[in-house]
Image (cartoon, grey):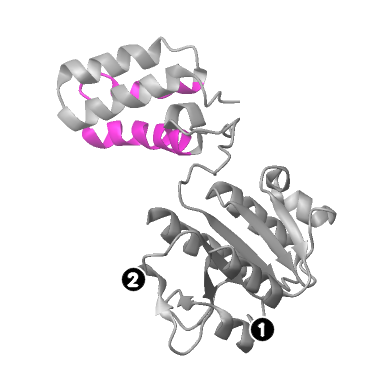
C-alpha cells in the first residue's frame, strides 16, 4: 500500500523529473541514490532505471509510475490555501452599506428554497421574504440545503407578493423583477438603485405578469445557449453577484 501523503514520493518525483529534464549525470545520480535507499520498496524497484549509462527512455519509464501516484494523491486544502471555515460573525448589514431584500414567490422546491437561504447568506442579503407556498426553515429539506443559513439570514413569510411589493415601495425600495421577459434589461448593464428588492418566481412559471408589471424594472440574465433560463437558485446567485459588484 503506497502512502500517497509521504514526502518521500514527492521528493522522488522531483528528482526523477530533474534527471529527465536536464539530462546530466549529476541529476541522474542524485535520483538513483535517492531511489535505491528509499524506505518504499516500490521506489527501490525503480532505481535500476536510473543506473549509470541509463537512457532518457528508461528515465521516462521511472517517471510514469511516479506521476500516476502524484495524480492520485489528494492535495490537501491547506496545501492549496483553500479556506474551509465559515465567517464566525455576520455583520448586521451583511457587510454592505446598501441594502438588498430578496422576495421568493411560490418557489415549489424545498431544496431550492434552502439554496436561496444559503445564497442569500453568502452574498450578505439583508433579509428574505417568502411568499405564497414557498417553504420555510420548518421544512427539513429547506433546513438541510440551507446548511445553517436559515439561522443567519433574517426572513419572514408573507401571503401575497403584491402586498409585499406595495410595502417595499412604501419603505423606499426599488423593486427589480428577475425574469425572462420582452423588454427586460441585461443585468450586466444595470447599476441597481439601493435599497432595492429582487423578485424571484416559480421554477416553471416564473413571476405572474402583473407582478412583473408592478416592479420598477425587469432584469434578465442573457442566455448563450439553447435554454433561455436557469434554475432559480443559480439565477439568484448570478444576479446577487452582479448586485454585489455594484
Q: Is residue 70 in the magenta section?
A: yes
Instruction: In the rendered view, tell whether residue 79 sits above or below residue 138.
Output: above
Visible residue check, residue 78: yes
Q: Is residue 83 above or below residue 97?
A: above
Residue at 56 percent across and 23 percent down: it is 3
Compared to 211, does 39 lie above or below?
above
Q: Secondary structure at mark 1?
A: loop
Position of 14 with respect to 204 (left or right) is left
Give left or right: position of 221 versus 89: left
**Residue holding disc 2:** 189
Q: Could you say where residue 59 lies in the image, as x and y percent from the top left?
A: 28, 31
The residue most toward the top is 37
- Which residue is at the front of the view, 194 or 77? 194
- What residue is disc 1 on? 205
Residue nearer the viewer, 2 or 228: 228
| Total tally of numbered discs in the picture | 2
Let me know if residue 127 is in the magenta part. no
Instruction: Look at 28% across and 19% down and name the residue there.
Output: 51
Q: Main secondary structure of the magenta part?
A: helix
Amino acid at each position: 500500500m503506497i502512502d500517497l501523503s509521504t514526502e518521500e514520493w514527492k521528493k522522488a518525483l522531483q528528482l526523477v523529473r530533474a534527471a529527465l529534464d536536464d539530462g546530466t549525470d549529476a541529476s541522474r545520480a542524485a535520483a538513483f541514490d535517492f531511489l535505491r535507499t528509499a524506505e518504499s520498496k516500490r521506489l527501490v524497484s525503480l532505481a535500476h532505471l536510473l543506473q549509470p549509462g541509463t537512457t532518457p527512455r528508461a528515465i521516462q519509464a521511472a517517471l510514469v509510475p511516479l506521476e500516476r501516484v502524484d495524480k492520485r494523491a489528494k492535495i490537501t486544502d491547506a496545501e492549496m490555501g483553500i479556506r474551509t471555515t465559515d465567517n464566525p460573525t455576520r455583520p448586521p448589514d451583511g457587510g454592505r452599506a446598501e441594502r438588498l431584500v430578496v422576495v421568493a414567490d411560490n418557489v415549489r422546491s424545498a431544496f431550492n428554497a434552502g439554496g436561496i437561504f444559503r445564497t442569500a447568506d453568502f452574498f450578505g442579503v439583508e433579509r428574505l421574504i417568502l411568499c405564497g407556498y414557498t417553504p420555510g426553515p420548518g421544512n427539513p429539506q429547506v433546513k438541510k440545503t440551507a446548511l445553517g443559513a436559515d439561522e443567519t439570514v433574517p426572513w419572514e413569510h408573507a401571503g401575497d407578493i403584491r402586498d409585499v411589493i406595495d410595502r417595499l415601495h412604501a419603505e423606499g425600495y426599488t423593486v427589480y423583477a428577475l425574469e425572462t421577459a420582452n423588454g427586460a434589461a441585461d443585468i450586466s448593464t444595470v447599476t441597481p438603485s439601493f435599497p432595492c428588492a429582487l423578485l424571484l418566481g416559480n421554477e416553471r412559471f416564473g413571476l405572474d405578469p402583473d407582478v412583473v408589471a408592478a416592479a420598477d424594472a425587469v432584469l434578465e440574465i442573457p442566455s448563450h445557449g439553447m435554454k433561455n433560463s436557469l434554475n432559480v437558485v443559480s439565477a439568484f446567485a448570478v444576479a446577487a453577484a452582479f448586485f454585489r459588484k455594484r
